[in-house]
């Protein structure tokens, strides 16, 4: 890379007899890449954030808790000393009735050793299918912000990288032109140094 002196802002657009066409072109490339980087990143981030927030809000409206009852004893044993189940939760088969009155069954997480008929709170969608607990408004904002930020940074990286690649190509081209000019004028000076 060529040696650069002190930084002078907007030097590519100033009138100067030494300014080359490549300098102005590089300035426009950098400006365009910078503007596209900011706009693409902000728009993609806001769009992703809004989309995730809307989807999570829709889940909070549509998903409802239902009481399911174990249809068979859950595997594992309960702790006799404390009366609580030992270990983590296990999968047990349960049945529930959806809002529309249809009967459903499936595997749910329960305490080990739970007996048949034990009530378990499950979350279902409109059709009565099992779903996870919906995100709270705070969790939804946090998740939407993280996903929006990731989408914005990822999208902004594209014009930024393309701008850097074009700038590097222009720099190589400028150095090649400099070498060609130097090779043409150096013999005229008679190789005198110092």
Image (cartoon, rainbow, N blue to C red):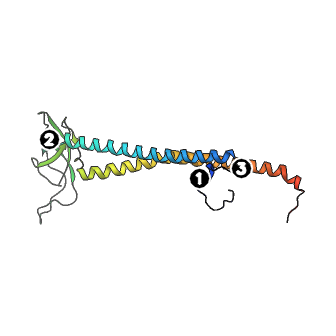
Q: Residue furthest right?
A: 190
Q: Tell me whether the residue at label 2 lies in contact with that at label 1, contact meaning CB atoms closer than 8 angstroms.
A: no
Crowding at dot 2, Cα within 10 Å, few <14 / some 14-19 / many 20+, comes out as many
Instruction: Give the residue displayed 15% in from the left and 54% down from the top.
Output: 113
Q: Earlier in the sequence, mark 1 or mark 3?
A: 1
Q: Residue furthest front?
A: 15
Front residue of this view, candidates 191 and 100: 191
Instruction: Give the residue displayed 66% in from the left and 47% down from the top.
Output: 170
Residue 95 marker: 2
Q: Position of residue 70 (x, y in %)?
A: 13, 46
Q: Which quadrant is the C terminus positioned in?
A: bottom right
**Left or right side of 117 for 123:** right
Crowding at dot 3, Cα within 10 Å, few <14 / some 14-19 / many 20+, comes out as few
Q: Tell me whether the residue at label 3 lies in contact with that at label 2, contact meaning CB atoms closer than 8 angstroms.
A: no
Q: Earlier in the sequence, mark 3 or mark 2?
A: 3
Check disc 3 and report its element: helix, strand or loop: loop
Distance (Cα) linking label 2 and label 1: 71 Å
Distance (Cα) linking label 1 and label 3: 15 Å
Front residue of this view, candidates 172 and 118: 172
Q: Earlier in the sequence, mark 2 or mark 1?
A: 1
Q: Tell me whether the residue at label 1 lies in contact with that at label 3, contact meaning CB atoms closer than 8 angstroms.
A: no
**Left or right side of 22 for 58:** left
**Left or right side of 59 for 79:** left
Instruction: Give the residue displayed 39% in from the left and 50% down from the top.
Output: 149
Residue 17 marker: 3
Residue 159 marker: none
Q: Position of residue 99 (x, y in %)?
A: 13, 36
Check disc 2 and report its element: helix, strand or loop: strand
Crowding at dot 1, Cα within 10 Å, few <14 / some 14-19 / many 20+, comes out as few
Mark in front: 3 vs 2: 3
Disc 1 target residue: 10
Instruction: Give the residue displayed 29% in from the left and 50% down from the top.
Output: 141
């Amino acid at each position: 890379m060529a040696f650069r002196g002190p930084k002078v802002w907007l030097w590519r657009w100033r009138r100067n007899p030494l300014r080359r066409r490549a300098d102005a072109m590089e300035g426009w490339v950098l400006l365009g890449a910078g503007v596209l980087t900011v706009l693409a990143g902000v728009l993609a981030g806001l769009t992703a954030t809004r989309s995730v927030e809307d989807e999570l809000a829709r889940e909070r409206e549509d998903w409802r808790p239902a009481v399911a009852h174990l249809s068979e004893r859950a595997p594992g044993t309960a702790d006799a000393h404390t009366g609580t189940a030992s270990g983590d939760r296990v999968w047990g088969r349960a049945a529930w009735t959806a809002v529309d009155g249809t009967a459903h069954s499936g595997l749910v997480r329960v305490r080990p050793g739970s007996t048949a008929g034990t009530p378990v709170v499950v979350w279902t969608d409109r059709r009565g299918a099992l779903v996870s607990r919906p995100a709270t408004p705070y969790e939804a904002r946090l998740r939407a912000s993280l996903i929006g930020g990731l989408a914005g940074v990822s999208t902004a990286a594209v014009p930024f990288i393309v701008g850097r690649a074009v700038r590097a190509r222009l720099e190589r081209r400028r150095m090649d032109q400099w070498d060609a000019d130097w090779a043409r004028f150096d013999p005229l000076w008679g190789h005198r140094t110092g």
